[in-house]
Every structure is written in structure tokens, then in C-alpha cells.
Image: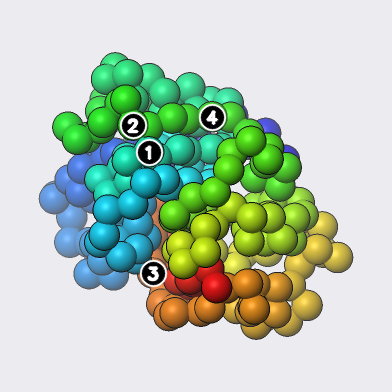
Amino acid sequence: MSAVYETGKVLAEYLLFHYGTDEEILPPDRPWPAGMREALGFPRRTVECFSSDRVARGLDLGCAVGGSTFEMARCCDEAMGIDFSHAFIRAAEALRRGEPVEYERLDEASLSTPLVARAPEYRAADRIRFLQGDAMHLPDALGEFDRVHAANLLCRLPKPRLLLERLPSLVKTGGELVLATPCTWLEEFTPRENWPPAGTLDWLKAVLIPDFELLRKSEEPFLIRETARKFQWTLSLVSVWRRA
């Protein structure tokens, strides 16, 4: 797995992505395109793809710094976030404990703005766990979950099929699965022989059906700010499934 997600630069970008206010990401002194504003709040929007019923257990795979895990805790008695990055999990765990996490938003060259990430007020620390782990080799002791969420993870795994083949034993019968992927397959992360042979959605159907029923799909934009003038605007394919 790439060490890029252990760097302070990327940690700061993801803290802003998950916890920054709209104004911190897109300061109001510029006429930002509407499409950029519509891309805000991605960690929340993917979780909103689940039904609104309360359930017992939720799992957030590739949770990064935990924004989606906190969102899952709104409707899960227990929410667990797992990420391969030690730096991401340290930050998420500090936020779970109620500690503010200071970071620098890079603006330009040596110019930066100090910011503070804070967990939402509903953080429910006693119902959330963060663990460092490998989504391709999850321990059997995790058990089953009513909901599994994996956003922008698949195309960053060396062997993504290992995760897909594990999902039937992770999601309870009748449970929900939300997968989001920008389909940015790169040899830096995934060897070419492990890429989907054709389109990503067709590949997901081939692997997941008949264990899962595809309920719906959508395209969700997201925005990661690198500097005051450089942003990653990306469209993620979101698919929602029910365990058969």
C-alpha cells in the first residue's frame, strides 16, 4: 500500500475534506463554480445512501480520518472505522476522544492557514471504534454488520477482489452495502492485472451477484483542496446493495 497516506500533507487535506467547514474549503472571497459547492460534504452524502432505520452494527472500510464513521454512528448502535493509514487512525481516534486536532491548510508555497478539526457534537465516543487494518485481510473476529460502507477505497487496493469476496461474510442477510469509487485505476496502487476487465460497475455485478442485489447507483462528486488554487474535483460511482 502507498505510504502517501502517512504524510502530513495528505493528512491535512483529509482533515479538511472530512471536517472543514464550507468556508474553510471554499473561502467566500471568490466566485467558485456551482459544481465545486455541490461536491462538498461527500463523507456525509455517501452515508445518507443507507436507509434511515436504526441498526446494531456498521462498518466503515477505508474510513480515512473518520468523518463517515461519525455519520454512521447516528443510526448505528456500534460504528467501526478501519483504515490502513496509521496517521489517519491516530487522528480519528483523537477526535473520537473529543480532542481537537490542529493542522495546516496549505494555501501557496510557504503560506498556510492554521485550522482545527473537531468531531461532531453527536460523536458518541462510546459507540465508535477506530482500528488500523488492511481491508484485503480483515480478521474473522469482526463478525457481521448490518451496514458496510467503503468510499473511494477499491481502486486504491492492490488486490480489490479480495475485499469483494469477503463482503458476503461481512454483511448480514438483508443488510446494506454502499460502495463508492472514482474508478481511477492506477498501477501506483493496483497492478494492471487486478483492474476490472471492463467497466467497474459490470465487474462489481459479476463478483457480487447473486450474494447481493443492486438497489441503485448514482454519481456523486467530491472535492479535495490541495492549495488555494488547486482542487481535485472527482466523480465517484456510488452503488447501493442489499445482501441476499
Residue 191: image location, x then y, percent = 82, 57
Tell me the distance, in whole angstroms, between the alpha carbons under discs 4 and 1.
13 Å
Q: Mark 4 points at which residue?
A: 131
Image marks 4 and 2: residues in contact by CB distance under 8 Å: no
Asked if the residues shown at circle 2 and circle 1 are in contact, with their CB atoms under 8 angstroms apart, the answer is yes
Looking at the rendered image, the disc whose residue lies closer to the viewer, 1 or 3, is 1
Residue at numbered disc 3? 220
Q: Which colour scheme is used?
A: rainbow
The residue that disc 1 covers is 78
Which tag is nearer the camera, tag 3 or tag 4?
A: 4
- What separation in Å lies between label 2 and label 3 (alpha carbons)? 28 Å
Q: Distance between the Cα atoms at labels 3 and 4?
A: 27 Å
Point 25% across, 61% down: residue = 52
Q: How crowded is mark 1: few (under 14 residues within 10 Å), some or many (20 or more)?
A: many
Task: Name the quadrant of the N terminus.
Answer: top right
Labels 2 and 1: the sequence-earlier one:
1
Picture layout, residue 9 above or below residue 179: above
| Badge 1 element | strand
Q: Is mark 4 in CB contact (under 8 Å) with mark 1?
A: no
Q: Which residue is drawn at 32% across and 19% down?
A: 97
Q: Which residue appears at 17% of the width and 45% of the height?
A: 23
Q: Which amino acid does label 4 sit on?
A: Leu
